[in-house]
Image (cartoon, rainbow, N blue to C red):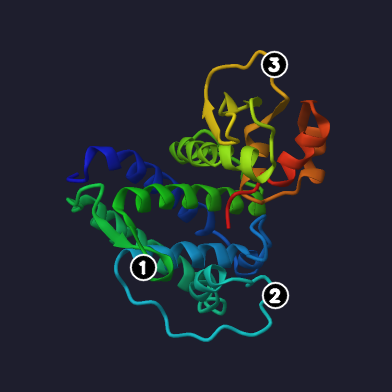
Amino acid sequence: MTVHPSLQTYADAWTHSLEAITELVTPLVEGEWNRATPCPAWSVRDIVSHVIGLETEFLGDPRPIHTLPRDLYHVKSDFARYMEMQVDVRRHHTAPEMVAELEYVLIRRARQLRNENRAPDARVRAPLGAEQTLELAMRMRAFDSWVHEQDLRAALGRPGNLDSPGAHITRDVLLEALPKVIAKDAGAPPNSAVVIDVHGPLEFLRTVRIGPDGRGTVDGSPSLGPVVTLATDWETYYRLACGRVRPAAVADRVKVDGDQELGAVILREFAVTP
């Protein structure tokens, strides 16, 4: 491959998840495409449509000319409206049409990656007419693809790949959001520390330290006197952080030590995906 070495990890993770998604949905019969997933308001078909749509945009294809129905209650922002367009336009596609388009876009994107020679800081297309670096775009495609692979696995009863390359990228993306979640959104007090202890297929311990100015930072060193310690398994962690489940639904899988009130606020603010 000619892809820049710093982008190879993202390319590999993306490939792993897209191939897994294709394997998951290829044998499905028509009715199974309508199964609900943990992704709010989206079915199996909708998630595959979303994946196809974003990959075609990454290829430079024009967005569909389509008017969204007025009764899509879950579409509440310009960002959601942007994402829903590629989904709604495919809602009446048949199972064979969906699989064929997914396989074709995977072939095209794999070819694009093989020929990719741009630098990581090259500017590329982003949602809503914005721009982003190629590195950020590839990182977020790897993250998004893995999370949606897990949505499909949950809907279809096919668990797996909780420690795959995409899982590691997802962990890092979600951890970057922790300082804002804990320091700003949950309002943890200055000069305090919150520990997140995660076990399972991916194990990690991180401490969010809130400085005297109220800003948070995250590191891998333990804290001797955290104001709160949250302990849970990796699957519950990512589901909470990606808004796939509410804290009350997994209360038995999250242990809160220390300030119970602050712990509850942190969990309430834990979801970071749009």
Please name which of the two marks, 1 or 3, marks the residue nearer to the observer: 3
Q: Determine the CA span between mark 2 and mark 3.
A: 45 Å
- Image coordinates of residue 207 in percent, x first then y, are 59, 25
Label 1 crowd bin: few (<14), some (14–19), many (20+), radius 10 Å: some
- Mark found first going from the N terminus, 2 or 3: 2
Query: What secondary structure is marked by label 3?
Result: loop
Q: Quadrant of residue 205?
A: top right
| Residue 42 spot, x, y in % from top left | 63, 65
Residue at coordinates 18% horizontally, 53% vertically from top-left?
115
Q: Residues within 10 Å of mark 3 (few under 14, many from 20)?
A: few
- Label 3 sits on residue: 225
Disc 1 to disc 3, how far (Cα)?
A: 48 Å
69 above or below 208?
A: below
Q: Which mark is residue 73?
A: 2
Name the N-terminal-most of marks 2 and 1.
1
What's the residue type where badge 1 is placed? Glu
**Numbered disc in front, either 2 or 3:** 3
User: In the rendered view, does 239 fall on the left or right side of 103?
Assistant: right
Q: Amino acid at mark 2?
A: Tyr
Confirm whether residue 68 shows in the render: yes
* Residue for point 42% across, 80% down: 64
Foreground pick, 228 / 139: 228
Location of mark 1 (residue): 57
Please report whichever mark, 1 or 3, sits nearer to the chain's N-terminal start. 1
